[in-house]
Image (cartoon, rainbow, N blue to C red):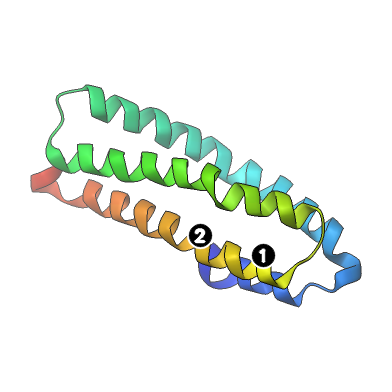
Amino acid sequence: MVQGFVYPAFHDVPDDRWAEHHRRHCFLIGLVVIPPMLGGFGASVICLVQPFGIGLKSAAVCFILGFVWTFARPAPLHSRLGAGKDSVVIDQLIRANLPRTVLWTAGALLCLLPPLAL
């Protein structure tokens, strides 16, 4: 959703509405994603320290790497966009979001594999 629609739509926001749009986006998306991110991080740590199978441990690694990537790349790009609309930075954000999307999707799929999830 974010990869395919939300971030690309940033290009369509008029320059005179950018500051308010981006501020509101960051606030509202934070309300939606921060609680599950914290829960997922905690669950991932538990999966790593408990005697779970390789599937859940691999999923945990995917989730944790996604969190690390989020703070290493997309978060700083959002900070730059907070200073003003920049099409180059928006394109960088779209590309920077892809590894996180792949990691979190892979982690979720690994959790669904019954033989590996035990």
Give the vertical position of 61 relative to 14 (above or below): above
Question: Visible in this render: residue 69?
Answer: yes
Residue at x 71% of width, y 72% of height: 87
Q: Position of residue 7 (x, y in %)?
A: 62, 66
Label 2 packing within 10 angstroms: few (<14), some (14-19), many (20+): many
Q: Position of residue 10 (x, y in %)?
A: 70, 69
Amino acid carrying label 1: it is Val
Residue at x 59% of width, y 65% of height: 92
Amino acid carrying label 2: it is Asn
Give the vertical position of 57 relative to 96 (above or below): above
Residue topped by disc 2: 97
Residue topped by disc 1: 89
Q: CA distance from mark 2 to mark 1?
A: 12 Å
Left or right: residue 37 compared with residue 32? left
Ranked by sequence position, the earlier of labels 2 and 1 is 1
Q: Position of residue 89 (x, y in %)?
A: 67, 65
Residue at x 13% of width, y 39% of height: 54
